[in-house]
Image (cartoon, rainbow, N blue to C red):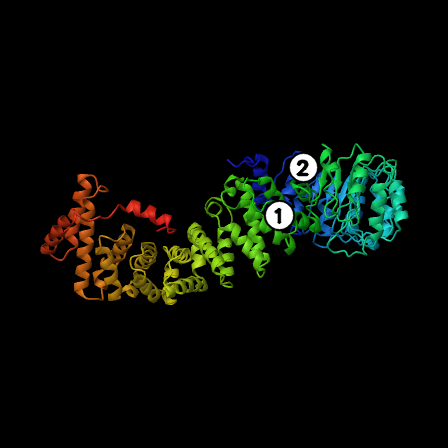
Amino acid sequence: MDAEGPEALSDLCLTQVCCSLDALCSRRADGSMCLSWALLFPQEVVDQLLRKMGTKGILNDTTVGIFRNCEELRLRRASIRFCPVSAEAFRLALCPHRLQELDASWVSGGLTGADIVSGLASNLECRSSLQRLSLNGLHLDWESLMEDGGTHVGFSSLQGLRTLSLANTDLTDAVLEDVCSLPQLESLDISCTVVSKLTALLDCKSTLKSLIAHRLRQLDMSPTGLFFVFSQLHALRHLDFSDDHITSDDSDGRDGDETVRQLLEGIPQVLPTLVSLDISGRKRITEAAVRAFVEARAGLVFMGLLATGASSSDVLTSQKNLKVTGEANENQVCEALRRYRDRECFTREALIHLYNLITDIDTPRPDMLKLVLGGMQSHPTSLHVHLVATACVFNLTTRDLAEAMPISLLSSTVNQLLYAMKTFPNHQQVQKNCLLALCSDYILQDVPFDKYLAAMLVINWLSRHEDPILQRMAVAVISILVAKLSTEETAQLSEDVSIMKQLLAIVQQKAMVGVVDSTLKFALSALWNLTDEMPTAARNFIECKGMELYEEVLESYYGEPSIEQKVLGLLNNIAEVEVLQDDLFEENLLEHILGLLQDSQVEVGVRYFAGGILAQLASRPEAWTLSAELLTAILKQLCLSVFAACFHNDVDTTGERNGLLQVIPSILPSASDWSAVRSAAVGSLGHSSGLQSKRFTLQQHAGEGGRD
């Protein structure tokens, strides 16, 4: 069982509801959905259903309509994060509820911060009940807010608010003043906004416990003024005044850096209740200043020092309850990945340090893989994050490390790798990292993921690159993936002639120099699997001049059973399609195949497929177009092979042996032929290695990558 345990029953039930919405709902006149029949849902389940619909990507103007029924479906903690919801749909579906929390961060569909605040304020209960509001990434559009019945509508209308997140919005100084007038405001996030003054914070200095002010690039205050504002926030327990060290030059944030220096070197009476300080990315921070700050505050529980160059002080490791983000050790790096998941600059920085830590890792670390995956998922379009993260994934899953990982974690990770391949198709290093991570027998064989998508992505990559090492890995991955596809997926893949041409080109490239390597073997296996019970693929193979190439390969690689078996396996697939059998009626080809069947020194797997091809063609004498002598020779050798097999251990009952012997004479032209075959077979039993059972050859064949 997966180390993370099975999925919760409630999650499974909610997933089923999400998949069955069309069947469970009727439609209103405006097209929105309404549950056809609903009892009074437990309140927590309603919150979970809304969140599940969002994570499944099905929450939109149509489906959110089911929450208009606020009698049976009562929302309290609502999340529509990243969902396409319009202002009208939001007003009708969510505003009537007595919400306590709302996360509308990064909502698409034209919904603005002004729409949300005015909608919530229209519900008198919400004005007092709403305690937590997240509008990160939204356009506030504050100018559109109008007087509502003579009363100003703004954040100050939501008098119950305690936590407000406005990161990455167009928050202005005027709106910040409105925010800071909230009587119970305890936590405020104004990161990556255009505010220029923080003096408005003095209006909530007695209630504000947490201030997150990361990367305030438009801040226009002197270090003395900033220090004064911070020093007046007597209730503050957490201060995040970090900066983006990557995009800033030496002159950016100089005043902020000086303010941080003053905070670190100031007396403990400044911010006396502070237990958490994040100054990651700040420049000109010294270890001596960090040491003085930590030693003066015994209650400190967190210090953010990533990308400051000041996280190596021994005082940081001597404090048992102190967590630190930095680059000095594994704990600091992992803490950075946990805390900065939503900040691209810090995620990238932490991943670089993690990569250096795990270059030679030999212990499974699912905790690290989960952190890496989280960074990739939080920044799906960031090339910088995926460039380092995909390299980390390879190091964390290479060799046998993957086998100790939870299956669900590996599945999510592989799907994210495929997303990276699709998102950055022209970046060679990202593609190489993903391919390296995918090239694992355990992952390809045992981990569930979209194997059809993976096959298509790797095939597309293969068409654009000729690096021999990467080509070998790509062909190996394709060979295994093709064998894992459903019949429908294989048929869909087989319709693409370009895939057949690419694989045949690799075979031809290797055959021209007579090399026997894994790239050639995997390419042959992939072609074999593509044509398995796929007439369209078999026809494409013929039309791409595959027959001519395979005849040359059979002659060039005589005595190489690993090559011969795969070539004959594909020709056997063609022989099974009656309308394509004419393309096999080449006298030289069939004589060569007959020779393989006749040679007792040839491996049994090769002889098995040689016999299969000849049996398919000989079973339709009315379609035979070559000489009668060759047909007779083929029939005799088939009977000889079957007869010889009767006296080996794989046919161990008298009934089976007699049954086989009775069939043989019926397919021979005359009794004299039967007598000749019988004599030859008896004479060969003493020295022939014989044919092994079909069961064994199939197992052997499966091990070689085929699935016939």
Q: Is residue 360 above or below residue 615?
A: above
Q: Earlier in the sequence, mark 2 or mark 1?
A: 2
Rendering coords of residue 79 (x, y %): 69, 43
Rendering coords of residue 26 (x, y %): 61, 46
| Identity of the residue drawn at 49% across and 42% down | 400
Q: Residue 49: which quarter of the image? A: top right
Identify which residue, 494 or 146, lies in the foreground: 494
Q: Is residue 151 visible?
A: no
Dot label at residue 72:
2
Q: Is residue 338 visible?
A: yes
**In the displayed structure image, the side of residue 87 where residue 671 appears, left or right:** left
Q: Is residue 442 above or below residue 636?
A: above
Identify which residue, 210 or 93, lies in the foreground: 210
**In the displayed structure image, the side of residue 683 where residue 389 appears, left or right:** right
> Disc 2 marks which amino acid?
Glu
> Disc 1 marks which amino acid?
Asn
Dot label at residue 356:
1
